[in-house]
Structure formats: C-alpha cells, structure tokens
Amino acid sequence: MNTPTALPFDLDQLASHSGRVVIFADTDAPLPRAAKRCDKLTRGAVARAVNSAEFAGLAAGKGLSLGYPAGMTARSLQIIRLPRRPAPDEARRAGNSIGRAQGEDAALVALDTLPLRDIALHALLRAYRYEAMKAAPKGPLGGLLCAVKDPDAAKAALDDASALAQSVHLTRDLVHAPANVLNTESFAAQIAGLADLGLTVEILDRDEMDALGMRALLAVGQASDNPPKLAIMHWKGAEGPPLCVLGKGVMFDTGGISLKPGAGMEEMTMDMGGAAVTVGLMQALALRKAPAHVVGLVGLVENMPDARAQRPGDIVRSMKGDMIEVINTDAEGRLVLADMLHYAAERFQPRAMIDLATLTGAIIIALGHDRAGVFCNDDTLADAILGAARDAGEGAWRMPLGAEYQRQIDSRLGDVKNTGGRPAGSCTAAAFLERFVPDGMPWAHLDIAGAALTKSDSAHAPKGASGWGVLTLDALVRVRFEG
C-alpha cells in the first residue's frame, strides 16, 4: 500500500470518492457525522445496515460492505463497528478490516477523531501481498486517505505508522524470498544498502570471522557455496551502551548431514526469519530517527549436506572457547548465535542482548503459531518484552530456563552438546544459548519458529510471513531504550 495521506475531514468527499469509502458506527449509538451523511446519500441504507442482526453480531472492529451504494460514486461502502472511544485491540481490529479489503483503488477512511495511528498502522500491515516472484504481478495496492479533524497534527502519526509498516513488509518480503534469489551475499548487499538511511553497516567475511575464532558459526556453512557473512548495523541515536539485537540468518536449512524430511522442506527459506526481523527493526529505527543506541547483528549462513559438511559427532571450538559436541547438524542455528552472542557482548558491552531465531520445532508444539517463546534471564527485561508484545498486538509467552535443562546438554566428550534430545527441546536450545551470555548480562531469546510463518491469517497479516517481532521490539525500544 502507498504511504497514507491525511486529509481534512470533509463530508462532501464521501459522495464523490470513486474507490472505497470507510465509515464507522456502533449499535445503540447515534450515527457519527460521516455515517449520517452516507445514510442520507444512500437513502437510509446505512441505518438499515447498522440496525441489522448481522451488524449487531459483529465484534468491534469488524465490518460489512455495501457494493456500489446508490447515491455515491464509491465502488463500495465499508461500515465498521467501532465505539467512539475504542480499546487498542478494537482499533487494531478495525485497521485489519480496512487493510484486508484493500484493492487497487484508494480507500477514503472517515476517521474524524478516532485513534489515527493504530487504525492506519494495522490497515497498512494487513494490506500486503508478496508478488515479487510472479511473472505478471498485480498492480500496487491503493493508498489510504485518512480524513481527520486535524491533518497537520496527523502527519507525525502517519509517518510513524508508515515507517513501521514498511519495515514489517520488508521483513515479510525477506522471509518469503526463495533461497536461490536471497542468499548470504545478496542479503548482505541489501543490508549494506541500509547505510543510505543513516545506519553504519559492517559486513564481515569468512576470513575475518575465522580470525575472530567464530568456528561454531563457520562450521554450519562450511559445505555451502554461498559464503558466510556477519552483518552489523549500528544506529546511534543516543549515547551510552547499546541494546544489541541478534538474528539467526540461516538462508536455507536442509538439516545438513542430519537431513530433514523432504515434505515441507521448501519452507526452510524462512530459517533466516530472526535476521529478517532484526533488519526490519533497524530500518524502522532509522526511518523514524529513534533516539536510541541499538546495534543489530545477523549471521548469514546456509546449511547444506556435502563432503565438506560437519558431521554428527564433530566437536568444534566456539569463539568463547567452549568445545561444542555436534549431536545433530539440524540444531545449527544455536551454533551461529553462540558465536554472535559472545562477539556482541565482548565488542559492544551492551545494556542488554536480545536474540531472535526460528530455532526449534518444539516451540511450535508448545505454543502453536500465535505466540513466540520468550526465554529471559532478567525479570524486568522479560516483563518489558511481554508488555511490548501486548501493546503491539503480537503474541508472546514466557518459557522457563533452569539448571535441569543445562544438565541435559552437558557433554561427555566436550563441554556442551548442541541438543539435549526431544524432551523440552526449545528449553534446552535456550539453555545452550545461555552458556554464551556473560554473567550479569540481561538477555532474552525469542524463539519465533511458529510466529514467523503462519498457516492462516494472523493478527495483522495474511497467511505466510508475519513479520512478528518488528512491532514488539520497536515498542520495547521506545519504552526501555530511548532517551
């Protein structure tokens, strides 16, 4: 969808707009100004719709549409049930309803004094489709024309909504892109282009990572013709130690020698979902000039089977120095993150670290596709992440850490195994990562394997890549790390 535009609230526009017109009403309440004008234009059709059993049965934020309404130029009139002072979830649902119905025509939304940012943001988030790989893609979705009481005051809110929506859409595009198009090198080049927004970007190659001792990360990608990369994005909108956000970027995951089953393997293009969220967040911070100090790191590798591939039973030295016994080469993302966590802590001395990864199928068994798993060693940080997710309308649930999970990954031959078996699989994966976090460092691991790619429409996205995490982390930065 194009960048939203704020227009003066003008009742005369309702009759002449040729695309979709969106108005709001509620049962057992007087019709708002725009609904009253449309009711007059359509000779009572709006009032009949609002007083119908179908409208009364709608949840707040849901709506119904009248096609080619008599007395109006519009192709359709969408009537959304919404109280004059909606709750945040009701406003988000209203935006979702608007975005879901978006076509190539511009939508004129008679917001008046309703909460502009939340409705516009979620309309933009839902009005998304990925057609980059179509031979004959459809035209772009139409724009969002927001008729409001004070257009000048609305501009900042719309700019903010647009920056977030663009960044979530970027994350979804990256997750959807096939691995023969988006590989370690092309992704790194795309990240380098973010320097145009004011980010400082570094790209480390294989030799530089080898010199640093990142042999756990390098072992994952050693069988691929696509060379490993570590991209570092620096946004310094404030002084002081940064927040470090780290994303797993396995561009395609075959499982390596521990080969995955063929059925469904095509979805493993999404195994770089943590990296995609990190890149989306860093773009959002740059677009809105966030007064925060944040460093984003993404480790880009491809996990392939080959004569050069690491084997089950191999033991590799991490950058920290711990010797990792590789039990299963399909538990590879944690090897990438292990070196990244140690590197970030050592180099940047951050206030806190948060990693995101499509790390385990076990988290999908535990939480499904509606919530990400939150593992955290600091109650204050955990509460802040869960609160940010709630405010953003994204599902999250705190999961446990503990000594019992550490015992599962103790290694007889090395220092630590990369998997503790099937029991508590997402918890032992988090426990593995915890070993590479310095004592006293606030840290959270977000397992987004279920939330990153959904089988049906999610809270604010069509089926497919959701972009989960950009909104939550942006909300967290605003509350905890700005200023």
Image: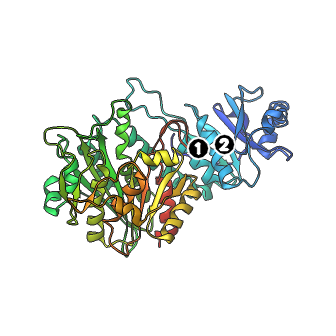
Q: Is residue 434 above or below residue 267?
A: below
**Real-space CA distance between mark 1 and mark 2, rounded to the nearest whole angstrom:** 10 Å
Query: Label 2 belongs to which residue?
Result: 109
User: How far across and down, in percent of the image, does residue 132 sit?
Assistant: 39, 32
Left or right relative to 418: residue 267: right
Q: Amino acid at mark 1?
A: Ala
Disc 1 element = helix
- Front position in the image: 116 or 422: 422
Query: Label 1 belongs to which residue?
Result: 123
- Front position in the image: 222 or 124: 222
Q: Residues within 10 Å of mark 2 (few under 14, many from 20)?
A: many
User: How far across and down, in percent of the image, does residue 479 sit?
Assistant: 52, 67
Query: Disc 1, disc 2: CB below 8 Å?
Result: yes
Q: Residues within 10 Å of mark 1 (few under 14, many from 20)?
A: many
Q: Quadrant of residue 412?
A: bottom left
Q: Is residue 481 above or below residue 86?
A: below
Q: How many marks?
A: 2
Q: Is residue 204 above or below residue 62?
A: below
